[in-house]
Amino acid sequence: MTELARSTGAVNLGQGVPELGSPRALLEDVAAAVLAGANQYPPAHGTPALREAVAAHQRRRYGLEYDPLGEVLVTTGATEALAGALLGLCDPGDEVLAFDPCYDAYAAVARFAGAKLVPVSLVTEGDAFVLDVDALRAAVTPRTRVLVLNTPHNPTGKVFTPAELAAVAEVCREHGLTVVTDEVYEHLVFGEGGGEGDGPVHRTIATLPGMRERTLTVSSAGKTFGVTGWKVGWVCGPAPLVAAVAGVKQFLTYTSGAPFQDALARALGGVEEWAAELRRTLGRNRDLLSDGLTRAGLRPYRADAGYFVQVDIRAWGHEDGVRFCRELPLRAGVVAIPTSAFFVRPGAPSHLVRFSFCKREEAVLDAVERLERAASAGPR
Ligand SMILES: *Cc1c(COP(=O)(O)O)cnc(C)c1O
């Protein structure tokens, strides 16, 4: 789709590469660290400064205590933390639960471990995606080892509600499951901290009763600071679970990101201020895109967080998202991605496509204008 955007000159709202900038001080700190010689293997678990900053962040934001020595591990992006967790915790034949649609790495890394990803459908209700607790319960078997949670969620922009998290936690406690929670969008819930008070808020499942001891919490600098190319992530959890990830990381990458780590430690210390501005920008883009899609006669779902909005294309007479996304650059000059790329289960809906809005406002406005023009130009 990115190649199609290039060859047709379409506005690319496909891939989720952020174009909203990064904190200037963070970029300067990294440049200075490179020149100062921070270019060799850092400690295998991450630099002390970054491990301490991650622990301080979890305490400040969620009231969770983690020992920077043994309960925090710096990884090569959230991706390595997720891969390390599934490789470290699953045996061949084990089953891993994930809510479908889901980030495409989960099924792949489960396969690396010889495990099987079992999708639990998120169902649509009005303009929202919601948890089906009965489907979750029905998906648990004696081979279920891990549940992968992702909130805020990619590709839907869903934020799991307190009631949904409580239901997930109950199932995990009942069946002795380990939770791997992917929270790379933890700072990107729109309206949060904006004084509105009644919007969705990001909560982390490790704060629920009996959950800290069975939860690995994964996050990353990429989405929060607009530095997806750096691939610096981290995972927090009880020492035995973190040790399982560290044992895999030792021979996957050993270590990574030397010049980034202490600079990110400093940025993480002041993340609230940066994130508040980023949320406002993204929230505005979400509104512009969702309203524009609606005016163009398409049906966007509600996105409360992150980079993406899901769109039902049936109002344009389309059933097949893959075909729709192939034709859209030619018909409207806009690129989107079929959500079928994120579904694991067979027979999943094909009428959903994903648009990203982590772009400059002009690009979003340009895309909206093109979609409206295509809508009024007739046969869809
Ligand atoms: C982008 C993304 C990741 C990958 O994070 P990295 O730090 O780049 O490895 C993981 N999970 C979700 C849900 C994402 O959207």
Image (spheres, rainbow, N blue to C red):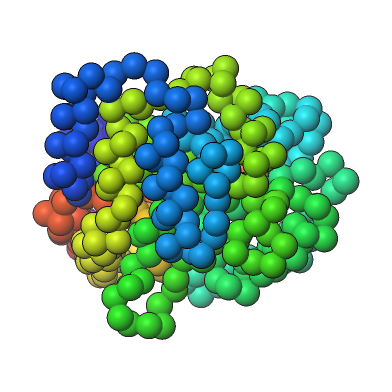
Q: Can you say whether 281 is above or below 194 in the image?
A: above
Q: Nearer the viewer, residue 222 or 26?
A: 26
Q: Can you say whether 62 is above or below 374 in the image?
A: below
Q: Position of residue 73 (x, y in %)?
A: 52, 37
Picture quarter with the C terminus: bottom left
The residue at the far right in this view is 142
Residue 91 visible in this rendered orientation of the protein: yes
Q: Residue visible at 63% across and 25% down?
A: 247
Asked whether, in this view, residue 167 is left or right of residue 292, the answer is: right
Q: Residue visible at 31% across and 53% down?
A: 269
Q: Position of residue 319 (x, y in %)?
A: 48, 53
Residue 318 visible in this rendered orientation of the protein: no
Q: Position of residue 49 (x, y in %)?
A: 37, 39
Q: Nearer the viewer, residue 13 or 177?
A: 177
The residue at the far left in this view is 362
Q: Nearer the viewer, residue 156 or 153?
A: 153
Q: Nearer the viewer, residue 164 or 16?
A: 164
Q: Residue visible at 42% across and 36% down?
A: 48
Asked whether, in this view, residue 292 is left or right of residue 123, the answer is: left
Q: Can you say whether 26 is above or below 55 in the image?
A: above
Q: Position of residue 241 (x, y in %)?
A: 67, 40
* Quarter of the image where one finds residue 25: top left
Q: Residue visible at 35% across and 27% down?
A: 257
Picture quarter with the N terminus: top left
In this rendering, the count of numbered labels is: 0
* Quarter of the image where one finds residue 86: top right
